[in-house]
């Protein structure tokens, strides 16, 4: 092959690569994302989020209940408690943020 044809063949091959490679990479990425969408870890995360969003009949964390209960650690130590104004969770007096919802606690309460 003469040198002009070799150069032309290399340019055609490079052009085809530039056109085809991004398409193939995109299709590979798309398939990978589809496989990850159906991954068991993602399924578990969705199930946990659904469970967290459902109201549950959990324990009563109100300050009065905790202080009145003899088995409560708060009643034994007679610690002062700050109740979160957002979620109502009792927190120790020295806490800056609520242990449940991470809202900044008001120091004046």
Image (cartoon, rainbow, N blue to C red):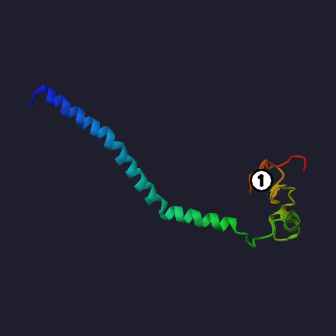
Tell me where residue 50 appears, x and y as whole percent.
64, 66
> For the point 59% across and 67% down, which residue is it?
47
Q: Residue furthest top?
A: 3
Residue 51, image quadrant: bottom right
Which quarter of the rendering shows the N terminus?
Answer: top left
Q: Is residue 38 above or below residue 104?
A: below
Tell me where residue 79 appears, x and y as whole percent.
85, 57
Q: Is residue 54 above or below residue 80?
A: below
SS at badge 1: loop
Residue 55, image quadrant: bottom right
Q: Is residue 107 above or below residue 34?
A: above
> For the point 29% across and 40% down, which residue is it?
17
Tell me where residue 44 appears, x and y as whole percent.
55, 65
> For the point 23% across and 35% down, which residue is it?
12
Give the crowd class for mark 1: few <14, some 14-19, many >=20 residues within 10 Å.
many
- Determine whether, in the image, residue 17 is placed left or right of residue 43: left
Q: Name the residue nearer the viewer: 6 or 52.
A: 6
Residue 54, image quadrant: bottom right
- Determine whether, in the image, residue 44 is placed left or right of residue 22: right
Tell me where residue 76 appears, x and y as whole percent.
84, 64
- Determine whether, in the image, residue 4 is placed left or right of residue 55: left
Number of numbered markers = 1
Q: Which residue is mark 1?
A: 98
Q: Name the residue nearer the viewer: 80 or 87.
A: 87
């Amino acid at each position: 092959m003469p040198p002009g044809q070799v150069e032309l063949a290399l340019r055609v091959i490079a052009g085809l690569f530039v056109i085809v490679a991004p398409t193939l990479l995109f299709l590979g990425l798309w398939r990978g994302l589809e496989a990850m969408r159906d991954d068991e870890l993602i399924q578990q995360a969705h199930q946990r989020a659904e469970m967290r969003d459902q109201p549950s009949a959990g324990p009563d964390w109100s300050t009065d209940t905790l202080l009145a209960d003899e088995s409560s650690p708060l009643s034994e130590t007679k610690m002062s408690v700050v109740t979160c104004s957002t979620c109502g969770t009792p927190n120790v007096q020295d806490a800056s943020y609520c242990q449940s919802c991470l809202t900044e606690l008001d120091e004046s309460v």
